[in-house]
């Protein structure tokens, strides 16, 4: 089976946008754990949209090392943004497990881990990840739908 890179880029971008929309809705509802969970998934998939330009993204919830390995293939004008997105993805990757399972060793559920401030911070990072993905894809001449 062959994978069309542009199809994968568009899929990952749409998936990331859907996760971001869900995170925004959950934030408005005061569901801090849900906001964190879907903002992390949005960030992960914005990073994977960039990775998909050059290769198939891994299944990891932390695509940062794969993205950093590809940084030299992006236009020079975008490399700092690509690095920034990789750093954001690395920073929030642990939230996938924490927002799903909590911290069992401490007896804490996801709802007991997060507050509004934490949810707002990761949501802001998800918005930044979207902006970076859109800027980089535009610099590559990839139209988004």
Image (spheres, rainbow, N blue to C red):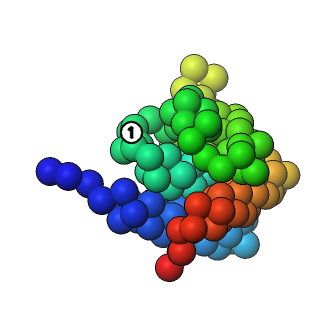
**Left or right position of 109 against 10:** right
| Residue at x 36% of width, y 57% of height | 5
Residue that extends furthest to the top in the rendered view of this protein: 105
Q: Is residue 37 visible?
A: no
Please, is residue 44 above or below residue 60 in the view?
below
Q: Position of residue 54 (x, y in %)?
A: 44, 46
Q: Position of residue 81 (x, y in %)?
A: 74, 48
The residue that mark 1 highlights is 59
Quadrant in the picture for residue 110: top right
Residue that extends furthest to the left in the rendered view of this protein: 1
Front residue of 141 and 113: 141
Q: Position of residue 124 (x, y in %)?
A: 79, 58
Front residue of 123 and 50: 50
| Residue at x 68% of width, y 69% of height | 24
Q: Position of residue 45 (x, y in %)?
A: 52, 53
| Residue at x 65% of width, y 58% of height | 136
**Left or right position of 89 against 142:** right
Please, is residue 59 above or below residue 53 in the view?
above
Residue that extends furthest to the right in the rendered view of this protein: 117
**Left or right position of 87 against 141:** right
**Left or right position of 46 against 12:** right
Q: Dot 1 surroundings within 10 Å: few (below 14), some, or many (20 or more)?
A: few
Please, is residue 89 above or below residue 52 in the view?
above
Which element is circle 1 on? loop
> Looking at the image, how many numbered discs can be counted on the residues?
1
| Residue at x 73% of width, y 72% of height | 28
Q: Is residue 74 visible?
A: yes
């Amino acid at each position: 089976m062959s994978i069309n890179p542009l199809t994968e880029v568009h899929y990952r971008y749409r998936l990331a946008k859907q996760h971001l929309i869900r995170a925004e809705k959950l934030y408005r509802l005061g569901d801090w754990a849900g906001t964190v969970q879907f903002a992390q998934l949005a960030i992960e998939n914005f990073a994977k949209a960039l990775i998909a330009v050059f290769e198939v993204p891994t299944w990891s919830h932390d695509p940062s090392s794969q993205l950093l390995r590809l940084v030299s293939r992006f236009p020079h004008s975008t490399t700092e943004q690509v690095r920034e997105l990789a750093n954001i993805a690395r920073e929030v990757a642990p939230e996938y497990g924490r927002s799903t399972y909590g911290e069992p060793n401490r007896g804490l559920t996801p709802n007991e881990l997060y507050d509004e401030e934490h949810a707002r911070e990761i949501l802001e990072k998800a918005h930044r990840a979207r902006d970076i993905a859109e800027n980089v894809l535009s610099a590559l001449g990839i139209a988004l739908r």
